[in-house]
Image: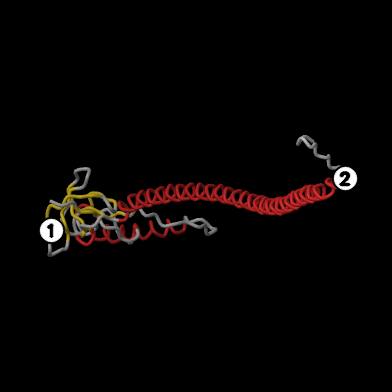
Amino acid sequence: MPPFFVAPHVESSYYLAIKHYGFSCQTRHNKGLTVKKLICMVLFSMLAAPTFAQDRYIADKLFTYMHSGPSNQYRIIGSIDAGEKVKLINTNKDTDYTQIVDERGRTGWVESRFVTRDVSMAVRLPQLEKELADVKSKLANARQSADSEKAGLVDSLEVRNKQIAELEKNYSDISKQLTASQSEVRELRAKLDTQKEDLLLKYFMYGGGVAGGGLLLGLVLPHIIPRRKRNPAGWA
């Protein structure tokens, strides 16, 4: 048999007391309690209120009365809190009362409108609060993990940016050095070409001078050196 729960309702305890005890006074079990006494009790409680109004809140813990029979004509045997799990035993459709057994083993009758299959907020609220706390914890962990990962990515990005900046600077320095080296190579090649031309020109001049000197000597020496007379015998 599925569990049933006592549904919460917003009737005040004074109204319930007047209502149920007013009906109960008609029975032989409550002859000593009259409506007049209940009214006096209510008026006394109202007069006993503090002079200065103070902020207060209505408590969530509501209750309903359990009767010994299937109507409010039967005596009240106790009360049951809203949201408490009960076992459904029987239902009286004529009076709209349901017989239940509460968690303390008491058997009684309550109005059928206060018995529901749904778990009341008094029970669901702690579960929802726990689920909300779990979700908040998971969200905080996820956010912390995301922040840590983000911080790691930012640090890695900064390191990469520094490395890229250093590489760009090194590339710029190397490019400048290469440009300077290329200029120096061109200057050296130009000097080398000039030196080659000068050397060839010197060789040419030396060669021309030697050739010219030899030709000149060949022309001049015969005139300078006298010829020997030949010996009649053929000897010089």
Q: Which mark is residue 109?
A: none
Q: Please state which amino acid type lies under the numbered disc 2.
A: Ile
Q: Is residue 17 left or right of residue 203?
A: left
In which quarter of the view is residue 8 placed? bottom left
Q: Which residue is mark 1?
A: 91
Relative image position of residue 33 (x, y in whole percent): 28, 55
Residue count near mark 1 (Cα–Cα under 10 Å), binned few <14, some 14–19, many ≥20: some
Relative image position of residue 144 (x, y in whole percent): 47, 47
Q: Which mark is residue 224?
A: 2
Relative image position of residue 225 (x, y in whole percent): 86, 42
Q: Could you say whether the residue bearing mark 2 is in a helix, strand or loop? A: helix
Q: Could you say whether the residue bearing mark 1 is in a helix, strand or loop? A: strand
Q: Please state which amino acid type lies under the numbered disc 1.
A: Thr
Q: Is residue 174 left or right of residue 86?
A: right
User: Which residue is painted at 82% across and 50% down in the image?
Assistant: 219
User: Which residue is painted at 84% across and 45% down in the image?
Assistant: 221
Task: Give 80 or 157, whichever is nearer the viewer.
Answer: 157
Task: Give 222 or 157, whichever is nearer the viewer.
Answer: 222
Relative image position of residue 1 (x, y in whole percent): 12, 51
Q: Is residue 135 left or right of residue 107?
A: right
Front of the two marks 2 and 1:
2
User: Which residue is painted at 21% across and 52% down in the image?
Assistant: 29
Residue count near mark 2 (Cα–Cα under 10 Å), binned few <14, some 14–19, many ≥20: few
Compare marks 2 and 1 and give the one earlier in the sequence: 1
Task: Give 195 or 95, whichever is nearer the viewer.
Answer: 195
